[in-house]
Image: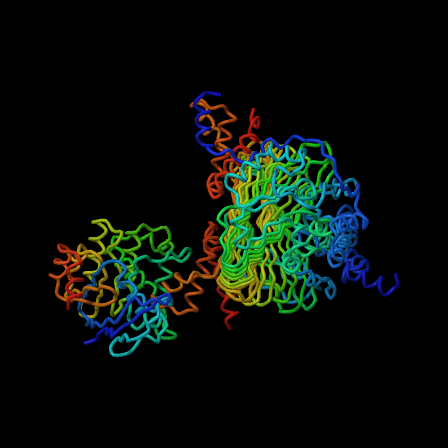
């Protein structure tokens, strides 16, 4: 079964080590959630896996289907099937969603192969309808002046169109009201299936009542300190993070 | 002064545009009316007496003056290869000039009364309009000498007149071609839009070969009461050309002029654009997109003059700089005393794409009325690394990501064009330019 | 004025600041040294002779004079009003001697009266680490608090600096602003007298400001002080200068040169509040050199004068150096404030900021000129420039002429400018609450510069506010 293997991952930014030895395997079809207080390295790990130039992997490895990706450029990693749903998606003035997605899909095709325009738009509109994104958005510049909810829905739209093998979803619930959260979660649940592994990064349990995870991990100070099933998330919600910290310190 | 030094001084001032060359030019103009010949003689005298720009000329600050020499050029000859179209857009009429002479004129459904003819013909049939509007505005941006050269050696050009109340839907296209090494061309387009008329005019500047050429062109845009002019110029001269282009825009009451200049060609290009807002309600939108590469220099000087209250001007010039290219943007907004309620904007954005490129911005304001809204801004920055990472994290390779971001940068300007066919044609032209460069 | 307004002002003005608002007075003074009228080699001979200068400096002055004569007035970009300066009718040196007094009691009575009226001795007692008071060509008084002097801080006038610290002085003098930088720096280099010389030893942080006061008293006079401030590694100093002159019917010239050197990690803050009388041509060259991780900040408030041309600059020479110019200018009827900033980035990761706010009243004209220069093969340089102009009357004038050169794709540079007026609505609102139109206007103008004024030491922001109030009186109606 295809898997995303994170092995003893250490990540530094600005000379400071943020992620300090995380190991985790996500198999296709599974949804993992990583929870933890702010600043414990959850987002750093996701950005490092996607290849953000500000984050250096100093030790360890990340394998997609047994193949190391950490020497690859960000776009090569994406074409290997890694998708990062950003916590704060960039605003890109002047580049329309339609043109952008076309370029991204074209980049995944073999040399000389051309995108089928009518099929492309049919698929695009279908996904947009699903995510309740107005069709006029195709000609709008990517994320430019979008509300928080519109940005997050556009991230899911891209995920739906690009069909990644592993999606890292960084605080996808942040900035969403309850209606927007439901739309986004419905979108993600539609994409769930045997060919996709998902890593949800979240601070709160509320997202996990909409996207129910198979596994829950707690990350503190750059390490995974506890793993369990979905009940762990509920426990964290009611008891906070301190008891995990305590338990870890005592161990 | 010894004879040789004298000769050198003369050559520095007029290059190969000597009195003999001018006499030969005049002799070839058959049937030109006397007043026209007199104007040209006066223009030549002005050209010959004015000095070349020097280092201390504020209007030439940052310009590479050594590249402006006028030696080694001669007025282009007839019979060269006719230029092809740079932009593929359906036109209401097309005039093609090669080396200043009319090569073809086609019309496919110009509305009744609209005139789109060579200047040589307008001299005979529309002398009054020509006298009133042809280069009638002051040269305020530093190129008095080169504008005089243009007027002296101008052979033919386009004259477009849209009468009162007439709307021309499709663009009128004028192609100005230059062919042959050392050819000097003096393209001109004069647009007079009558009361409440509407017209779109496209100038295309095309070299048929890659030689060293001199292009010294001008366009006059006159928008009468309530008129609307959209003017697009695609400058695609040879990459060895020295180019001057002088624009004068006059905006009358409630009129609107939108001009967009796309600069792709020439080794050194100087573009001067003057908008005079002469009556309340007038709007001038001044747009430019420049792809500067190689070791080319693009030197843009603009002036927005608000001469009446309640007028508006909006300038947006965007440059993408690659390789060792240099750009200069020097813009000035002048609000005359009593031009209250002026709304003026001026923005120069430089996208730096190479460590060897250099941008110079001189955005200026001179304001003498207090109840105004005037702002300007200039930025020079690279591609935002976060934007680039975002695109690449979606699997788009670096070259493609850069291209998308360059187009995204230009889109804010191109978007302002209402005409979608024109918009797409300009995008196509830029794309081809970037692709040629990449090889 | 209603009572409540007075109360408000008293509350807002808890310190009696330096009072430049009443600079228009004059006491008769007799001068022991006078170089006469007009400028020639003999003028330079005289000045150098009075100061008993060394040969190198004498030669320096004479060369500078040649440069001055050879350079044209910069009217190809600057105001033609410069042509109205008659250099032959100016007196270039006037003093009662070259040794300043260390106590106010020793200062001759005629000069002391002037400074007392301006509030200098009182201010010194209250909050300053040292004071130098220049009267025409030389300092009449100069003193530094013992505690500061004991840290090794040198604060003397330039004449003394040359005499007592010749090696240190010569090492840095004329290095930041070469003689030929412009016509007026050449003039200053030829005939300079007075100004401050400051040296702060490594690591010393001078906790209170050093203050210099420049007073022009004589008619047809030119004041040419020369200031040199050197902050050694990791040291910090704040220097403040004030300037006034009585109103004369003829033109007076003030042409200073100020050079700052901030060595590694040092911080210099230089504050000017100028209120020249409207007959003064104020043509000043100010520039600082910031080494690695050093910071130079110019706070420049220009009120008064006939024509001010002043563009404080910072050459960012060391990695991560920072430069900042905060400029406030108020141009009233018949005045032209031509001010701005110059930022030259000469090392990686250097940052500069320029904030300029100008106010044009009546027929006054405020001009901003700026240069930002980032040459090739540097990386990570940043500049941010903001220019805001406030126009009070219908035909007030403002100009903005920045020049920005950026080479390479590793920098971020941004310039923005805007123009606004005081809205009639705002004025009406305040009038409805009982303020006069002038008071309302004054409040609005102070509001316009408030975010900048807050960065000054309180004594100076109070003074600035008072000067603005005075200028705004009678500006409307």
Whether residue C265 is visible here, answered yes or no, is yes
Residue B146 in percent (x, y) is at 71, 54
Q: Residue at x 65, y 30 (%)?
A: C25
Count of numbered labels shown in the rendering: 0
Q: Quadrant of the C terminus of chain C?
A: top right
Q: Residue at x 57, y 31 (%)?
A: C471
Query: On screen, B159 above or below B310?
Result: below
Q: Residue at x 22, y 53 (%)?
A: A181
Residue C74 in percent (x, y) is at 71, 49
Q: Quadrant of residue B391?
A: bottom left
A51 or B69: nearer the viewer:
A51
B176 or B257: nearer the viewer:
B257
Determine the residue located farthest toward the bottom in the rendered image. Answer: A66
Q: Quadrant of residue C199?
A: bottom right
Q: Quadrant of residue C103?
A: top right
Q: Residue at x 46, y 20 (%)?
A: C2
B437 or A136: nearer the viewer:
B437
Determine the residue located farthest toward the left in the rendered image. Answer: A231
Coloring scheme of the render?
rainbow
Residue C99 in percent (x, y) is at 68, 46
Determine the residue located farthest toward the right in the rendered image. Answer: B2
Whether residue B377 is visible here, answered yes or no, is no
C178 or C406: nearer the viewer:
C178
Residue C348 in percent (x, y) is at 51, 64
């Amino acid at each position: 079964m295809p898997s995303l293997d994170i092995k003893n991952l250490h990540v530094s930014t600005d000379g400071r080590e943020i992620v300090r030895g995380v190991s985790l395997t996500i198999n296709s079809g599974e949804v993992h959630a990583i929870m933890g207080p702010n600043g414990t390295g959850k987002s750093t790990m996701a950005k490092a896996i996607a290849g953000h130039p500000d984050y250096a992997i100093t030790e360890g490895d990340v394998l997609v289907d047994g193949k190391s990706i950490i020497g690859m450029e960000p776009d090569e990693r994406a074409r290997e099937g890694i998708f990062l749903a950003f916590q704060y998606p960039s605003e890109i003035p002047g580049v329309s969603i339609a043109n952008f997605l076309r370029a991204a899909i074209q980049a995944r095709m073999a040399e000389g192969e051309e995108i089928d325009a009518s099929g492309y738009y049919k698929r695009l509109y279908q996904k947009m309808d699903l995510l309740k994104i107005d069709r006029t958005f195709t000609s709008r510049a990517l994320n430019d002046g979008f509300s928080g909810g519109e940005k997050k829905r556009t991230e899911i739209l891209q995920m739906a169109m690009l069909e990644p093998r592993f999606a890292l979803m960084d605080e996808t619930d942040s900035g969403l009201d309850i209606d927007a959260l439901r739309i986004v979660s419905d979108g993600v649940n539609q994409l769930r299936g045997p060919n996709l592994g998902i890593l949800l990064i979240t601070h709160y349990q509320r997202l996990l009542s909409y996207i129910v995870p198979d596994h829950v991990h707690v990350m503190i100070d750059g390490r995974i300190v506890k793993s369990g099933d979905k009940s762990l998330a509920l426990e964290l919600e009611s008891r906070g993070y301190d008891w995990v910290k305590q338990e870890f310190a005592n161990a | 002064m010894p004879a040789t030094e004298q000769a050198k001084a003369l050559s520095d001032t007029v290059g190969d545009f000597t009195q003999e060359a001018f006499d030969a030019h005049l002799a070839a103009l058959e049937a030109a009316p006397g007043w026209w010949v007199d104007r040209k003689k006066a223009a030549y005298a002005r050209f010959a007496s004015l000095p070349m720009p020097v280092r201390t000329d504020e209007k030439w600050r940052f310009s590479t003056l050594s590249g402006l020499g006028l030696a080694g050029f001669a007025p282009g000859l007839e019979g060269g290869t006719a230029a092809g179209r740079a932009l593929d857009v359906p036109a209401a009429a097309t005039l093609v000039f090669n080396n200043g002479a009319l090569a073809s004129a086609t019309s496919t459904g110009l509305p009744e009364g609209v005139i789109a003819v060579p200047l040589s013909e307008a001299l005979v049939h529309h002398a009054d309009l020509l006298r009133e509007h042809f280069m009638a505005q002051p040269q305020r941006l530093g190129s008095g000498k080169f504008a005089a050269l243009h007027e002296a050696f101008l052979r033919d050009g386009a004259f477009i007149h849209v009468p009162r109340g007439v709307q021309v839907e499709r663009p009128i296209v004028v192609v100005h071609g230059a062919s042959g090494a050392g050819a000097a061309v003096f393209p001109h387009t004069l647009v007079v839009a009558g009361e409440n008329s509407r017209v779109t005019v496209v100038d295309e500047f095309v070299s048929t070969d890659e030689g060293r050429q001199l292009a010294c062109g001008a366009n006059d845009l006159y928008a009468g009461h309530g008129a609307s002019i959209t003017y697009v110029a695609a400058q695609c001269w040879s990459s060895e050309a020295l180019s001057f282009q002088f624009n004068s825009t006059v905006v009358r009451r409630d009129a609107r002029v939108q001009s967009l200049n796309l600069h792709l060609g020439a080794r050194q290009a100087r573009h001067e654009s003057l908008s005079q807002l002469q009556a309340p309600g007038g709007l001038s939108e001044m747009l430019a997109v420049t792809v500067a590469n190689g070791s080319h220099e693009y030197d843009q000087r603009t002036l927005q003059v608000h001469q009446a209250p309640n007028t508006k001007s909006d300038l947006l010039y965007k440059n993408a700089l690659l390789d060792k290219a240099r750009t200069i943007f020097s813009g000035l907004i002048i609000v005359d005393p009593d031009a209250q309620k002026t709304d003026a904007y001026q923005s120069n954005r430089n996208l730096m794409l190479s460590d060897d490129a250099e941008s110079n911005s001189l955005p200026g304001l001179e304001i003498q009325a207090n109840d105004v809204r005037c702002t300007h801004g200039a930025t020079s920055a690279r591609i935002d690394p976060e934007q680039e990472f975002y695109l690449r994290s979606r699997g788009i390779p670096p070259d493609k990501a850069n291209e998308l971001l360059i187009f995204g940068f230009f889109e804010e300007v191109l978007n302002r064009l209402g005409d979608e066919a024109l918009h797409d044609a300009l995008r196509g032209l830029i794309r081809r330019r970037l692709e040629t460069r990449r090889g | 004025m209603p009572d409540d307004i007075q109360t408000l002002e008293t509350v807002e003005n808890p310190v009696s600041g330096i009072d430049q608002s009443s600079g228009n007075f004059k006491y008769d003074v007799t001068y022991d040294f006078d170089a006469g009228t007009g400028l020639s080699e003999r003028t330079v001979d005289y000045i150098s002779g009075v100061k008993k200068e060394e040969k190198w400096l004498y030669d320096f002055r004479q060369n500078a004079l040649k440069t001055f004569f050879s350079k044209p007035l910069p009217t190809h970009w600057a105001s033609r009003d410069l042509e109205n300066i008659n250099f032959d009718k100016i007196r270039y040196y006037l003093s009662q001697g070259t040794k300043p007094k260390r106590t106010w009691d020793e200062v001759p009575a005629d000069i002391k009266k002037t400074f007392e009226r301006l509030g200098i001795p009182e201010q010194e007692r209250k909050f300053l680490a040292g004071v130098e008071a220049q009267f025409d060509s030389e300092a009449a008084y100069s003193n530094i608090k013992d505690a500061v002097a004991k840290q090794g801080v040198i604060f003397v006038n330039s004449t003394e600096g040359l005499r007592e610290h010749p090696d240190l002085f010569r090492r840095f003098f004329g290095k930041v602003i070469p003689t030929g930088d412009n016509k007026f720096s050449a003039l200053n280099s030829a005939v300079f007298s007075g100004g401050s010389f400051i040296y702060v030893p490594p690591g010393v942080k001078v906790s209170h400001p050093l203050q210099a006061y420049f007073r022009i008293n004589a008619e047809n006079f030119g004041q040419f002080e020369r200031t040199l401030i050197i902050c050694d590694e990791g040291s910090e100093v704040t220097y403040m200068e004030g300037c006034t002159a009585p109103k004369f019917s003829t033109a007076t010239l003030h042409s200073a040169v100020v050079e700052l050197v901030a060595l590694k990690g040092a911080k210099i803050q230089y504050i000017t509040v100028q209120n020249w009388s409207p007959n003064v041509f104020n043509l000043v060259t100010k520039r600082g050199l910031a080494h690695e991780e050093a910071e130079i900040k110019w706070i420049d408030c220009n009120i008064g004068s006939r024509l001010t041309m002043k563009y404080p600059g910072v050459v960012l020479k060391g990695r991560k150096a920072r430069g900042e110019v905060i400029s406030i200018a108020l141009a009233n009827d018949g005045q032209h404030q031509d001010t701005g900033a110059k930022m030259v980035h000469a090392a990686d990761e250097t940052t500069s900021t320029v904030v300029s706010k100008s106010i044009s009243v009546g027929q006054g004209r405020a001009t901003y000129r700026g240069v930002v220069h980032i040459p090739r093969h540097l990386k990570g340089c940043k500049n941010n420039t903001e220019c805001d102009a406030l126009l009070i009357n219908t035909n007030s004038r403002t100009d903005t002429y920045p020049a920005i050169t950026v080479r390479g794709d590793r920098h971020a540079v941004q310039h923005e400018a805007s123009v606004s007026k005081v809205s009639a609505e705002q004025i009406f609102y305040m009038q409805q609450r009982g303020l006069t139109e002038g008071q309302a206007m004054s409040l609005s103008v102070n509001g316009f510069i408030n975010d900048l004024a807050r960065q000054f030491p309180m004594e100076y922001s109070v003074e600035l506010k008072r000067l603005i109030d005075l200028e705004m009186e009678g500006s409307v109606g």
